[in-house]
Amino acid sequence: MDKFSIIRDITLILAVSLPVLYVFRKIKISPIIGFLITGIIIGPSGLHLIAQNEQIEVMSEVGIILLMFTIGLEFSIAKLVQMKKYLLLFGGLQVIISSAAGFGLLAFYGMPIQVAVFIGMVVSLSSTTIVLKLLAEKSEVDSPHGKISVGILIFQDLAVIPMLIILPLLKSGESFSIGSFMLKILFAGTLITAMIALARFVVPKLLYFVSSMRMREVFSASVVVLIFGTAYLAHAVGLSFSIGVFIAGFIIAESEFSYQILSEITPFRDIFNSIFFVSAGLLLSLTVLREHFIQILLMSLVVVGIKAAIVLLIVLALGYPSRTGIVAGVSLAQIGEFGFVLAKSGEQAGIISASGNNIFLSVAILTMVFTPFLFEFVPRVFHFLHLKDDFDYDAPPRRKSIPLENHVIIAGYGLNGRNLVKVLKETGIPYIILELNPGTVRKVKSEGENILYGDITKRDILLRAGIMKAKVFVYAISDPRSTRVSLAMAKMLNPKVHTIVRTRYVTEIDELAKLKADTVIPEEFETSLQIFSKVLAEYHLPVNIVMRQINIIRQDSYQMLRNAQSGISPMHLMDIIARSVTETFFIESTSKAIGKSLKEIDLRAATGATIISIVRQDTPINNPSGLTKLLYGDVLVLTGTHEAVDAAIDLLNGSGETINNTV
């Protein structure tokens, strides 16, 4: 056997899955089914292009590990407390009643207790991926049936952990003892408690230390060690891989590193998950499906009917309308992706046979296929019958609520970032900060700032920061590569977001402009403009003239400063300077002009400038006479040429002798 055949197999899996997924997307069916169909097409029951082997099994196990870890990351204690009503009442009742119904039905038909318990657990689970996608597409996550469905799905995902603990206790051929069963549960609970303590007190400190190094590759490698290390530790003490990584993910979800870790592993999770579902499809025998098609179809209909009915009864018992119960029941009527995980583990443990697993896979796939069609069909029937509940299904789809809208995303919390935050606070403009320094994030978050630990080059981090609804994205960092990558991604996700980029390097301007940066601020040229404006201010050039010239330079990407042959018409400074200007002068307490009349000073004769007004205690004295005496606190309004005004200011700032000499 070619030791590199795995490369060929992965290439085949991904190459065949692409067109299949495209077709399934067009007909609005879950990509999970697409991967399962891909496995059937290229597997032993299809074109015989690939066979299930140990290498693919290992990769599919990696997919399960990453899936369980990310599910743990998605949970947090705060989230569970927030959804406790839907989680405990609806979720707990659904899993318990569905498992009991499956067990009772199978036990009635003579199935062994272990098998009946196992299949009852598996059938109670629904597909989080399919249900959430259907609810999101119709903007019904916040509807009554949406909240109920999400609560049940979260409880199901949590219930997988005790199911995985129970699984080794149901091995075929072993006597079933309640006493030994409880002892094993106690042992598993003790091990899990020890792992939780390890993850709670050691892992966050380790992540903080690693992130403080500010090296992406080290952080990524540490995440991989964390995931597979906890998985192997759990396996070494007699638990499953999945339990260990779920616990690690659940604990890390409370830390500031959760979003960044999720963004690091999401691409790998998606790839390995696809391999897992393809490997499940490889196991499916078309011969078994053909020979038992009627039986499989009837079993699929029974599963869908019983699960939907159980959810409906729970919803009605808790006081909700029938429509809410029926739509929620139809949404959750399929067997979920964790069913495949448990089924595979069950076959490895000898609880079910290979042929039994084939029948289960066929039933699960059919229930998944039914779901999108039922989800579309049932509301239309209700609409036809004019049945309604407290959610207006005929209203335009509601936008999914997000924490920020028309806000500013600030990349980096250095000096520029902090100054910008101060201004935004004063003006009441919402903002969120993205920062990679863990010490800064921890300190600033404790002060109540809206700050997120995350790499701006990661798509998931930008989505968490609300890039789709952001109005402005400010790059206040000194990392050209990260800025370019993030800028391209931000413009792809939201072409309308106004991007402001700070750069130290002039050579970056053209490249950033190609990436559609709206405003580029090179530090060295901005320093030149500050000097330029200060020099012109000394010549009393009108502020609008100075600002107009600065804006011309900025709007032309600093070409005047970058290229002497830019073709931009220079300002006629001498013409502007030769024109009359108006300036103000404040009489200080030390001034020798205090008590002098305008006739005594005779400023016009001495300098050519004229005092056209005096502002005294907020009251203007227009066209003052020569007898008007100057007082402390007066503001003189001077007019004349630039040279005359400069001379007048020098005279007024001069010694008493100078003023006396003019008398």
Image: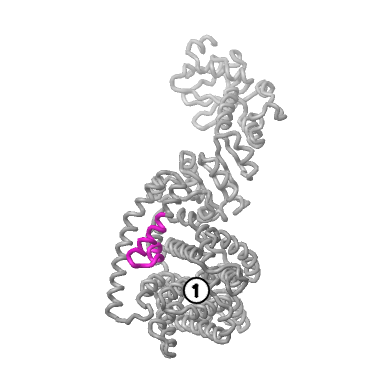
Q: The C terminus lies in which quarter of the figure?
A: top right
Q: Quadrant of residue 574?
A: top right
Q: Where residue 479 appears, x then y in whole percent?
A: 52, 40
Q: Where residue 507 appears, x then y in whole percent?
A: 60, 34
Q: Nearer the viewer, residue 523 or 385?
A: 523
Can residue 106 be seen here? yes
Q: Nearer the viewer, residue 133 or 590?
A: 133
- Looking at the picture, does residue 457 appear above or below residue 509? below
Q: Amino acid at mark 1?
A: Gly
Residue pictured at 55% horizontal, 39% vertical: 502
- Residue 243 drawn in magenta: yes
Can residue 138 be seen here? no
User: Dot 1: within a 10 Å radius of its alpha carbon, few (fewer than 14), some, or many (20 or more) residues?
Assistant: many
Q: Which residue is mark 1?
A: 336
Residue pictured at 51% horizontal, 41% vertical: 477
- Looking at the picture, does residue 589 appear above or below residue 505? above
- Residue 213 drawn in magenta: no
Q: Where residue 506 appears, x then y in whole percent?
A: 59, 33
Q: Where residue 318 appears, x then y in whole percent?
A: 43, 80
Residue pictured at 72% horizontal, 29% vertical: 567
Q: Nearer the viewer, residue 599 or 386?
A: 386
Q: In the shown orientation, is residue 132 left or right of residue 41? A: left
Q: In the shown orientation, is residue 494 left or right of residue 90? A: right
Mark 1 falls on what kind of element? loop
Give, as a single range, the part of the protein colored magenta.
225-246
- Looking at the picture, does residue 395 appear above or below residue 576? below
